[in-house]
Image: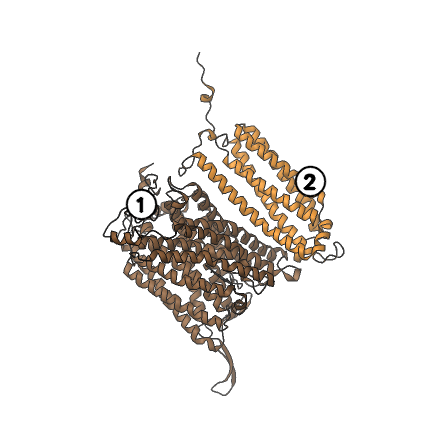
Chain colours: A orange, B brown
Amino acid sequence: MTTVPVNMTKKPEPHETYVHGHHWRSAEDEKDAAKLGMWLFLGTEALMFSGFFCAYAVFRMLYFDTWHESSKYYLNWKIGGFNTLVLLISSFTIVQAIRGAQLGRKMMAFWYLAATNVCALTFLVVKLGWEYLPKIQKGELPGGFFTYGHGPAGTTHDQVFLGIYWVATATHGLHVLIGVFIIGWCMIRTMKGHFGPKNYMFLENTGLYWHIVDIIWIFLFPMLYLVG
Amino acid sequence: MSADHDVSFLKPVGDYGQGGVFSAQWWRGFTTDFWRWATTLDHKKIGVMYLCATLFAFFLGGVAALMLRAELFEPTITQQVTDAAGNVVTKTTGELFPGWQSTQGTVTTNNFYNRLFSLHGTLMVFLFIIPAVPAAFGNIFLPIMIGAKDVAFPRLNLMSWYIYLFGGIFAVYSLIAGGVETGWTFYTPYSTSTQWGSVTSMVLGAFILGFSSILTGMNFIVTVHKLRAPGMGWFDMPLFVWAAYATSIIQVLATPVLAITLLMIVFERTFRVGVFDPALGGDPVLFQHFFWFYSHPAVYIMIVPAFGIVSELIAVHCHKRLFGYKAIAFSSIGIAAVSFLIWGHHMFTAESPAANVIFSALTFLVGLPTAIKVFNWVATMYKASITWNTPMLYAMSFLFNFTIGGLTGPPLAVLSTDIHLHDTYFVVAHFHYVMMGGSVIAVLGALHHWWPKFTGKMYNDKAARWMAVLVFVGFNITFFTQFFLGTHGMPRRYATYVPEFTHLHQISTIGSWVLAVGLFGHLLIFAQSLVGGRPAGRNPWGGLTLEWYTDSPPIEHNFPHEPMLTHGPYDYDLVVPPGWDPADYPLPDPETVRKAHGH
Ligand code: HEM
Ligand SMILES: [Cu+2]
């Protein structure tokens, strides 16, 4: 009795038959280019957030006392710290997901991606439920919507601090949300067998995106919650 | 590769039948081609679509400019006069646009004027000149010039085109739905507090356009790094590619800061964040820093690609190796670097004296790489056998105008003179000499230089030369007068002026008509060329860069085989241009070429 080789009985997964774009000389070139492009994109993200960092620095210089007091009064470092931890874990899990794809272990990639998304959603839920919602109820809103009459004694420009807090964290939160969708998309593509040792470019770039989102938070957290 | 890849990228594929425009078959054919273009990943098609859109924006912005000049033909004067019946009445003369009632209140002539110049500025800057060279000419020619089949990320390229369209729709919507009166600079607190018009949607439009610009820049950087033809080292690249590369770096580094700045304005207006609003403890000067941190480099996004164009024009039409290739290449990078350090020169009246001194000193630095380029171009022309066709006339026009524009920069960078010249027509004249006299003239030069290549048709060169002269003369009449207006104290952005300025303003307005006639003439000549131009050969001018090696118009994948580089982009003393046809242009006498290269 002759046996059919195992790999001939099953249809090849898409990643096994991947061909690079027609305008590339090799798959290697294509991958390098995608990575270079992604790094440039990360640069633009960092520069974009640097606008908030500059504004933060300028006003911290102008209204030093306000910055100091507001940070302690309005923000709870424990919540921020918890979220930092969650994001750090997610950075680790997404690296493991890429590893899974590189090793050709589909389910490993899938479940680590899922874990990453759980972390991301935890971050968002904590942010909305324990920070944004109470703040909205108490009127601790940016600039013109700020309810005067409460806040730490002796401060003058809480509304500017909160203004920067809101725009910076909301813009960051939006990036997390976009990440959730991209990672979800990666999960679908993983199940369809698009990623494997020969083709994990998209997954790797998603990982890079996710790292920059984390890194930006790593800057925002001490600036807003700890240093003030 | 199927056979249909070897045909011109412009060739329609739909089956139009014989019934003409009114038959259903014609429309089926049209729909086929329409979808092919709308979903194309071909960089050349995307580039052509960009070209049409940016030129349309140029047209709209130009109409606004003519209206502005028309309003300024006479000063608006309101006086008490005694009419025939002996009653004293108030009479206003010299107003071109009457005011009207809108849902938001009375729109006066002055309001309307403000809207017009804001419309003019935003259209010209964000929708025309920033995307015109990189996104239009860069897309069509950059991949061909480095011997690639396409840009690195074709899908991203298509996406950035749609982002551009989307942003453009926002901008045009804002103009219809009330317009903005803030100027293209959106200075706070006016832009964050005014209830007039549609600042929010306009700013969002500019924000979206910024994304398109970033994506194009990223795409080009990666393309240049990864897709050069075998044998093409960095110093074998045409200078247009170097310039596009330097521009892309500025686009990628500067535009995100504009993005966040504009987003903050939107936040200010919708969520009243107050970071730029002094009433809430914010700082309006911070806005100016953010804005110019982008917008000063942005003026180099507008001019550096023009430098690249001029290098090509001069080399090809002088049939000569460019003098100082590396100096020109590196000066583009030098300009890109310095451009990030001098934004403060727009705010000499709003920042601290110490910052003023630093920014003033740094601003002078940017004159160096710029001057290096101009000297090298002039040195290239020395003893060359120049073909005086339209593209070459435009190169000359560029050198003349840009030098004036560049030399009027230093008086603005000197603190003691800028105090007087800031916010006057001198600044208006300065930046029109660099942006219109430089960039737009270079775009016109590029259009005439590459038209035969991407349409496959020649145009009437003699008529175009006359129009080039008209444009040159009209431009200089329009804007040279404005230097005098500025030094005499005419402030910018006003709908009227004291009667003493009437003569100069009238000369300027008449100049704008001459300019308009010239530009309109070009339009007619191009239209004639599309309909009845004689077919262009592969290499009508005798260029040596790779785009002259492929068909006119280029085939679907640019080259039948991947090109192998065998000579540098400007080796005119070593190789005979490919596809040389003596009917197109006479090859210069070899003896002259030899002498010109100093052998
Ligand atoms: C030697 C080079 C240059 C120098 C030293 C220079 C210097 C300056 C200075 C100091 C100002 C501010 C004037 C004021 O507002 O009081 C200015 C304005 C301006 N320049 Fe230049 N410039 C140079 C080249 C260019 C180029 C190449 C471009 C564009 C292609 C350009 C575009 C502009 C624009 C658009 C403004 C006015 C912006 C506004 O307020 O709306 N400049 N320039
Ligand atoms: Cu500037």
Specify the amino acid type for callout 2: Phe
In the displayed orientation, state which residue is furthest to the right: A153
Q: Work out which quarter of the rendered image holds the N terminus of chain B and state it.
A: top left
Mark 1 C-beta to ligand 1 under 8 Å? no
Mark 2 C-beta to ligand 2 under 8 Å? no
Q: Residues within 10 Å of mark 1 (few under 14, many from 20)?
A: many
Residue A119 visible: yes
Q: Nearer the viewer, residue A134 or B264?
A: B264
Is A7 on the left-hand or right-hand side of B450? right
Above or below residue A217? Residue B499 is: below
Measured from the top left, where is residue B7 in percent x and y? Answer: 31, 43
Disc 1, SS:
helix
Measured from the top left, where is residue A150 in percent x and y? Answer: 75, 55
Mark 2 sits on what residue? A82
Measured from the top left, where is residue B281 in percent x and y? Answer: 66, 60
Rendered image quadrant of residue B132: bottom left
Which is closer to the viewer, label 1 or label 2?
1
Q: Nearer the viewer, residue A181 or B246?
A: B246
In the displayed orientation, state which residue is furthest to the top: A1
Specify the amino acid type for callout 1: Tyr
Picture disc at residue B549:
1
